[in-house]
Image (cartoon, helix red, strand yellow):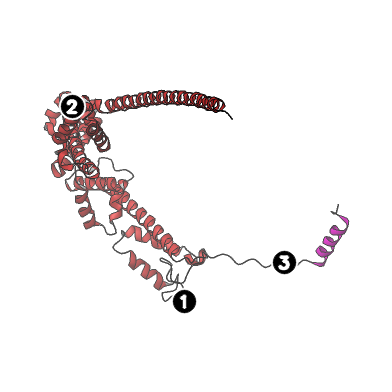
Amino acid sequence: MSDEGVEEIVESLLRQGLVAASQLAEQLARARSQYLAKAERDGERAALEARRIMVGDRAMMRALILPTTADQWWATAKPAQIIEVHLMAQAWKAHDPEALVASEKINREIKDRYGIDTADAGDDVPYLQDRLAVQQLAEQQQRVAREHAEAMELVARAQKIELARVAAELHEQMQTHRVPAEYLSNHELVTALQGVKDATGEQAELAAERAVAERMHLIEQDGIHGPEVGQLRDEIGAHYAGVGDQAWTDAGFVVAARRWHEARMLATGGFVDSEPAQGESRYQIAEKDLLARRDALHQVGASRELRDDSADRMNPTGQLLGGPTPGLEGSAGKGGPVYGSAEYYREFERSLRGLATEGEITGRMAAARSQGKHPSEAVTGLTPAPMVRKTAFEVGLEQTRNQEGPAR
């Protein structure tokens, strides 16, 4: 091959290489430009998203800490809410001026209201929350006590106004019976004075005046508000046995005890019933009601104890275990007197002494003698009655019915 042919081949190869190199350079430049454009777009998108998140977080922060500038928020805020706004303000105070102002406000309020320095607590959130809860509870108790005192003051003021109104309305009756103004706190006395004012007729006036005199006597003996429960307990305990602590938790028994006390004080003070009901005095009626309530409470307590004891002595299969049942001793074979014997009734009467009056003992003895069986025997299931054997005629008739259908 000549030299000219070699030069042409080399020149052609160089020309092709330059074209390929220029195309590659153009592709690289285009790819770099696209990459830079994409990176710029991604950066702008990320910056925009970051700004959007920042704006949202700042708006949430401001909405959370803005109410802390009002005193009403601190009056009802709970420890968890205070901790939340405190932490939020601390996190944002280096990035937002409002957060810085709110942080100073929150720290100052916590120190002034609860005596807690947030700088000492640092990042110990449980400690700060516990301290806030304790201080807030103490403040709430003080507020409740203050509100209670204010309410009692209002009640006392209202009572004073009401007493003044009643005193003006019953002024003539108070002057006649020499009733001090402070005695009008006794509702029964006010009712009696009103009865004097409204009474028409000689008998009604005498009864109303007697009621006022009785109430005045009771107030002079027991005070305006009457005897306390402790006084009634001691007084009734000295006159009657068998009145347990359970009776004094029953409102009906306490009312009956107070009526009995008043009837006794009036009787000892010389106040006699004008018209005894069915031949019984006021004191006798009050005593009967008191003892009846005492006995009723005894029966309820005994029934409850009997049920509890029976339940305790039941085995898992529901059968009653061995051992005497309270209140059913005295039957044959149990070591005591035979039920219904003279010895049994003597012991029963002896057990009632000191717990009931003579009339009650007589009634209970009569009721006990009317029982034909011991209680344990009365609740025992009856044995099945023996079956009657059928006659030959009845057997034949039954067979005929089975074979031919019902007899006509």
For mark 1, what is the residue? 333
Q: List the single residue furthest toward the right.
A: 404
Quarter of the figure that contains the N terminus: top right
Helix, strand or loop at label 3? It is loop
Question: What is the C-alpha distance between the residues marked 3 and 1?
Answer: 35 Å
Q: Position of residue 14 (x, y in %)?
A: 50, 26
Q: Which mark is residue 101?
A: 2
**Looking at numbered disc 2 in the image, what kind of residue is underneath it?**
Val
Helix, strand or loop at label 2? It is helix
Of circles 3 and 1, the one toward us is 1
Q: How many marks?
A: 3
**Looking at numbered disc 3 in the image, what kind of residue is underneath it?**
Val
Point out the tag, 2 or 3, that comes first from the N-terminus.
Answer: 2
**Can the viewer see residue 293 in this picture?**
yes
Question: Residue at 20% of width from left, 25% of height from top?
Answer: 97
Q: Position of residue 373 (x, y in %)?
A: 50, 66
Horizontal side of residue 63 vs 110, given as left or right: right
Q: Nearer the viewer, residue 5 or 297?
A: 5
Q: Quadrant of residue 271?
A: top left
Residues tagged 3 and 1 counted as in contact (Cβ below 8 A):
no
Q: Residues within 10 Å of mark 1 (few under 14, many from 20)?
A: few
Q: Residues within 10 Å of mark 3 (few under 14, many from 20)?
A: few
Helix, strand or loop at label 1? It is loop
Q: Which mark is residue 388?
A: 3
Q: Nearer the viewer, residue 73 or 233?
A: 73
Q: Eyeballing the image, is 263 above or below 344?
A: above
Query: What secondary structure prevails in the magenta region?
Result: helix
Q: Is residue 95 magenta?
A: no
Question: What is the C-alpha distance between the residues marked 1 and 2?
Answer: 93 Å
Q: Which residues are magenta?
A: 391-405
